[in-house]
Amino acid sequence: MTNKILKLVEKVMEVNENTKHDVFFNIVPHVKRCDIRIYKGGWEKEVRNKIEDIHFYYNEYYKKEDYDKMINRLEELLND
């Protein structure tokens, strides 16, 4: 699972460095969950852009489709 999380962090950084979007990454260890928050078009103090939250659990509730959804969404942002 560590490799999956590292891949996710790499994708988040790739989006942040190469697009106009801002993606925040959060890990919640007490419930074993990873979250990303996407600010399409970039973060602003006054929220005007669409915010999208996606998460997956890395415990017994892990679902491959949740992780894939997150990775695929980051890929979409890279191609945006």
Image: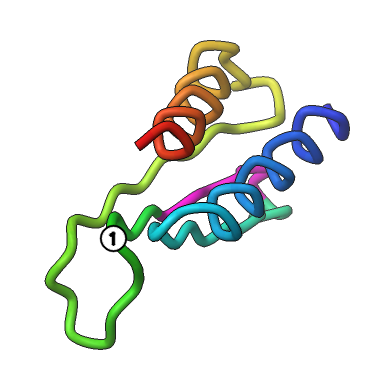
State left or right for residue 6 relative to residue 13: right
Front residue of 28 and 77: 77
* Residue 19 rendering spot, x and y as whole percentages: 46, 53
Residue 44 percent across, percent down from the top left: 28, 80
Magenta-tinted stretch: 31-37
Q: Pointer 1: what residue?
A: 41
Q: Quadrant of the N terminus?
A: top right
Eyeballing the image, is 74 above or below 34?
Answer: above
Is 6 displayed left or right of 16 in the figure? right
Q: Residue furthest right?
A: 2
Tag 1: Cα neighbours inside 10 Å, few (<14), some, or many (≥20)? some
Residue 74 among magenta residues = no
Q: Secondary structure at mark 1?
A: loop
Is 67 located above or below residue 17 in the figure?
above
Number of numbered discs overlaid on the protein picture: 1
| Point 50% across, 12% down: residue | 65
Q: How far from the left and from the top, in percent, is residue 36?
A: 49, 50
Q: Quadrant of the C terminus?
A: top left
Image colouring: rainbow
Give the camera-side residue of 29 and 70.
Answer: 70
Q: Give the residue furthest to the left.
A: 48
User: Could you say where residue 48 lies in the image, as x and y percent from the top left?
Assistant: 12, 71
Q: Quadrant of residue 45?
A: bottom left
Q: What amino acid type is highlighted by mark number 1?
A: Gly
Where residue 11 sits, quadrant-wise, is: top right
Q: Residue at x 73, y 53 (%)?
A: 29
Residue located 70% across and 54% down the image: 30
Residue at 34% x, 67% y: name it: 42
What is the chief secondary structure element of the magenta stretch? Answer: strand
